[in-house]
Image (spheres, helix red, strand yellow):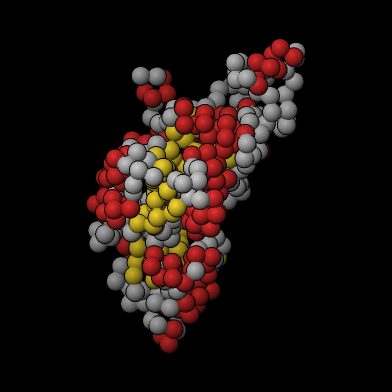
Amino acid sequence: MSKQESQGFRTRAVHAGHGLDPVTGAHAVPIYATSTFGYGNAERGARLFAGEEPGYFYSRLSNPTVRAFEEKIASLEGAGDAVAFGSGMGAASAVALTFLKAGDAVAFVGPLYGGTEGLLRDILGRFGVTVHEARDVEALRTLVSDRTRLVWLETPTNPTLKVVDLRAAAKVAHAAGALVVVDNTFSTPYLTRPLEFGADLVMHSATKYLGGHGDVIAGVVAGSTDLVAELRLHGLRHVGAALGPFEAYLLLRGLKTLPLRMEAHCANAQALAEALQDHPALQALHYPGLQGHPGHEVAARQMRAFGGLVSLDLGSQEAAFAFLDHLKLFTQAVSLGDVESLSSHPASTTHQLLGEETLARQGITPGLVRLSVGIEDPEDLIRDVLGALEKVPVSAGR
Ligand code: PLP
């Protein structure tokens, strides 16, 4: 067992991926703000470019601050390696462009984040890739074939908080010879490590909980050394959505408190969901930590706690908008996973481009509101939500 594997998650969140700076002894990882690195002589330059000697030579491909972030994520996900990108969508498109070709099929258990579905349906479709949407793992079984190269999963799903059984889905995908990629943005490696359930690749919008403070846009993918090397070559070197060193520094800083933040997010979300159970203004309440949630048992098996997102259905867009407009502590803004609480209306924002038919099929109703529960005092958050629900006019569907 390596030293890192023998250390606990909180220790690795603080220490993995870096030590003292070898030149100055700096305790925090320095921001290596440089686009290129002098390689000294032509022979060494040739060796670096051929991959025959490790080292830095151009920051689109690798940078010491970014590398520390990648190594920390690899450690936290229990992966052989990781590669960082300039956004979650940069990571997703790199995965698609690296592992798919014309004639292949992709299957996913929907809904996925709206941007990911847009990438799969609108862009890959134009390049001869067939896209299949499954409602659940059973339906996935009937949709995969020997043409299926990737099975794309997200759990809990954005924004309906459906739970996907990773082990069962990975079995189906592998039987068809497909690679499994799991978007772990909502769970983070603190709650779920998809590679332990059979995934081949795990990706993140690091913009969310990994950064945690709402001040960075970033993405990352972890997996075996071989798959990550392929991704770095094709998805990063040739596609180019590289992460900057300043963003990597912010991520390294945020990750040190990931376990502590996730504990607070999960405890607050659980308390809020319990306070909202049976509320007369709600047509539905989605939180995997509630006993009545259809994915509760699977979530209990594959998650350490149930996450920081709670979704509510108020029955109509009018009621949802009235509720959102009366919240005081939950800033109305897309994104999630910040220490501050956020609220949004997915059907008219993040998922709008999917169109009415897909939204209806996936349960992203006009009345659905997504709450990203922050780390504030739970009593204040509960008071804010209950107060805003009180203000929703009965005529709006209460
Ligand atoms: N995956 C999920 C689950 C998301 O919620 C998001 C963004 O909201 C993305 C991917 C895309 O990430 P980014 O906004 O960092 O490009």
Relative to 363, residue 204 above or below: above
Q: Residue at x 35, y 19 (%)?
A: 1
For the point 41% across and 58% down, which residue is it?
Answer: 111
- Residue 254: percent from the left, percent from the top? 54, 41
In percent of width and height, residue 309 lies at: 42, 57
Instruction: Count the numbered circles shown.
Output: 0
Whether residue 107 is visible, yes or no, is: yes
Residue sitting farthest toward the bottom: 395
Residue 313 in picture, x, y percent from top left? 39, 71
| In-front residue for pair 350/390 | 350
Quadrant housing the C terminus: bottom left
Residue 31 spot, x, y in % from top left: 67, 32
Note whether residue 272 is visible. Answer: no
In the displayed structure, does residue 264 sit left or right of residue 125?
Answer: left
Q: Quadrant of residue 393?
A: bottom left
Q: Is residue 222 above or below residue 375?
A: above
- Identify the residue at image location x=44%, y=68%: 359
Q: Residue at 28% of width from left, 50% of height from top?
A: 141
Quadrant of residue 200 within the rendered picture: top left
Image quarter for residue 296?
Answer: bottom left
Q: Considering depth in this image, is 316 or 213 the residue closer to the camera?
A: 316
Q: Eyeballing the image, is 244 above or below 29? A: below
Eyeballing the image, is 333 above or below 303? below
Query: Residue 140 vs residue 263: left or right?
Result: left
